[in-house]
Image (tube, rainbow, N blue to C red):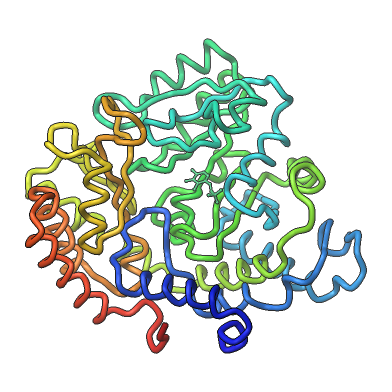
Amino acid sequence: MSHLASADPEVAAAIAAELRRQQDDLELIASENYASPAVLEAMGSPLTNKYAEGLPGRRYYGGCEHVDVVENIARKRARRLFMVEGHDIGVNVQPHSGAQANAAAFLALMKPGDTFLGLDLSHGGHLTHGSPVNASGKIWRPVHYHVGSDGFIDMDEVRDLARAHAPKVIVVGASAYPRTLDFAAFRAIADEVGAVVMADIAHIAGLVAAGLHPSPFPHCQVVTSTTHKTLRGPRGGLIMAERPRMKAVNSAVFPGTQGGPLMHVIAAKAVAFGEAATDGFRAYQRRVLDNAQAMAARLVERGFRLVSGGTDNHLMLLDLREEPISGKDAETALGLAGITVNKNTVPGETRSPMVTSGIRIGTPAMTTRGLGVEEARQVADWIADVLRAPEDESVRARVREGVTELCRAFPVYPGWSA
Ligand SMILES: *Cc1c(COP(=O)(O)O)cnc(C)c1O
């Protein structure tokens, strides 16, 4: 980045510091990952200069012949990645983010004021699934379902709410849910009340692409996702739908909710979808799951409680309600030891959302840098050590030293220096 360093040393220095942080700290935020150098190059390309409102072959601007090639590659690869045999789907790769994908999907599926079901935010749902502070909760009428005391989604409640409220849409998806989503069960309930099932696979898209989480298709009529979580692409969004619904989806993206698409990001999405179709990517997702299993097992051995008792996917929720430490203080203590996690509410939460009684731990990023089950167990031990003695500076210093050594041995971008 020699141009940037000489043209704008101030911004260049902050970027270098962030690269150092990513290299030197252990990233366990479940929604984060490290995109490949190829993805980063596509994102940093002159495609950012191009306006391309509309779809390939039907643009509102001239000069789109090359970005058309790029967007068509992205659409074709995403379709191949997520389509199931005998069930045709279309893809829109233009949403700027997961939230934008959800806004467009809602616009395509509902009129203002229509009712939908979604998972409660404090039970693992997402802001865009009907939180009162988000447009989804202001424009449409959300009704929330929950997880039961066992930590699993309460499908009886979903059925009861569906019958009572006759929603237009049932949203299936989560940001902090460690278990497998049963898309077929949601579809059966939706069919009973004439609702459409919209899956939001923002977190689990990489697992779905690798065949390690059941596919939302053919059960869900519309599927939204991010491209930067387990899928390991650039920061962005994606909408897929049964073919007859694509016209509504496409016009809900543009002109419904967005202007010009980010063609440099779409190029990076195309690269990431290509990577996700490889055997290497499937093996990576397998290791993500193995690492989550190893970490969950070790935390339970060390006497911690996990919401639902464990995990089927890439993340786990540590339930600290019976520990003397809050989620906020746990996040801070681990951060000082070089381990990055986020505080999270847990079912039956008694503290405020700014404090919480839980932390969310995910394995996608640490697995990308090459850590395996042996290291996962070690990291779980470090987390346990810090959380059991959060005020003990010597424990934190010892863990920080171990983290630094581990990160040096497993560089994120080998050969890059900040
Ligand atoms: C992360 C996430 C989103 C939002 O994605 P952004 O790219 O941050 O807008 C939407 N839905 C779910 C379930 C998520 O986890």
Q: Determine whether, in the image, residue 113 is placed left or right of residue 254.
A: left
On screen, residue 59 above or below 137? below
Total numbered badges shown on the rendered structure: 0
* Place of residue 275 in the rendered image (x, y in percent of width and height, measured from the top left): 52, 73
Left or right, 217 with reference to 67: left
- Where residue 40 sits, quadrant-wise, is bottom right
**Picture layout, residue 374 above or below residue 221:** below
Q: Quadrant of the N terminus?
A: bottom right
The image quarter containing residue 179 is top left
Considering every residue shown, the one lying at the far top of the view is 164
Question: Which corner quadrant holds the C terminus?
Answer: bottom left
What's the residue at 79%, 57% (across, down)? 260
- Of 218 and 344, which appears nearest the observer? 344
Query: 235 above or below 350?
Result: below
Estimate the x, y position of residue 111 in percent, counting from the top left: 74, 25
Q: For the point 60% across and 79% down, which residue is it?
A: 8
Query: Horizontally, is 270 left or right of 63 in the view?
Result: left
| Residue 351 location, quadrant | top left
Q: Nearer the viewer, residue 130 or 271?
A: 130
Q: Is residue 266 left or right of residue 174?
A: right
Observer-nearest of 96 and 289: 96
Image location of residue 311, percent across then percent down: 27, 46
Q: Residue at x 46, y 54 (%)?
A: 208
